[in-house]
Image: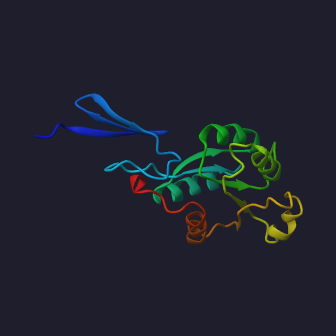
């Protein structure tokens, strides 16, 4: 006879509930492996873009492919949300009101907790890389540049190359 059980996902771990008591609490966020019989949490992507349509498109694309997402509409909102969310990857628009993507990128790379998080820069300019490369710190270029309009298969390949595929928990 097995006791009915269920698993609840929380932002930083899973709770296994058996007969309304907590039997196991495990933090999988950065451990790299789950306990026997447990699944890891989906990888997290922070989307920072001033265009609502782009944010929703990326959110839908990533979540449909098993990733968790959080969004911000500009650099001022993006930094505190990113610091609180602790993503595995950041997509960042360059041209935004209040604080440019370049200024936010520099701030993220100065933050000890966020400096190792891969950043994919999104831009609508055709000469994006040559134009913006001069504005980024020389030894800390973004992990990838993606031109708008976004080609979803290419973006997913880049994301998977940087942080791997989404875990089974998000499928």
User: Residue 126 at what x, y percent from top left?
Assistant: 79, 71
> Where residue 165 sits in the image (x, y, percent)?
49, 62
Left or right: 49 in relation to 6:
right
Residue situated furthest top in the rendering = 21
Along the horizontal axis of the image, is 7 left or right of 144?
left
Closer to the camera in the image, 128 or 27: 27
Task: In the rendered view, tell whether residue 141 sits above or below residue 127.
Answer: above
State which quadrant residue 81 falls in: top right
- Residue at 75 percent of width and 60 percent of height: 142
Viewport quadrant of the C terminus:
bottom left
x and y, in percent, of residue 134 in the image: 89, 63
On screen, residue 22 above or below 119: above
In the visual, does 83 lie left or right of 65? right
Colour setting = rainbow
Pick out the residue farthest to the right. Answer: 134
Pick whichever, 167 or 123, lies toward us.
167
Splitting the image into 4 quarters, where does residue 8 fall?
top left
Residue 19 place in picture, x, y as percent: 22, 30
Which quadrant, please, contains the N terminus? top left
Q: Residue at x 55, y 71 (%)?
A: 153
* 100 vs 141: above or below: above
Task: Left or right? Give the position of 92 relative to 157.
Answer: right
Question: At x 77% / y 51%, what residue is drawn?
Answer: 105
Q: How many numbered dots are placed on residues in this image?
A: 0
């Amino acid at each position: 006879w097995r006791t009915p059980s269920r698993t609840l996902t929380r932002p930083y771990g899973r709770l296994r509930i058996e007969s309304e008591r907590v039997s196991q609490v495990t933090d999988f966020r950065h451990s790299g492996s789950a306990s026997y019989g447990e699944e890891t949490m989906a990888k997290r992507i922070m989307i920072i873009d001033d265009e609502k349509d782009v944010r929703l498109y990326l959110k839908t694309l990533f979540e449909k492919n098993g990733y968790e997402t959080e969004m911000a509409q500009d650099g001022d909102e993006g930094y505190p949300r990113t610091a609180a969310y602790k993503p595995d990857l950041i997509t960042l628009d360059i041209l935004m009101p209040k604080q440019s993507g370049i200024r936010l990128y520099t701030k993220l790379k100065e933050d000890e907790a966020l400096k190792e998080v891969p950043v994919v820069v999104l831009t609508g300019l055709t000469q994006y890389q040559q134009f913006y490369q001069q504005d980024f710190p020389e030894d800390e270029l973004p992990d990838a540049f993606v031109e708008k309009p976004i080609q979803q298969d290419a973006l997913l390949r880049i994301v998977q190359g940087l942080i791997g595929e989404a875990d089974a928990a998000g499928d």
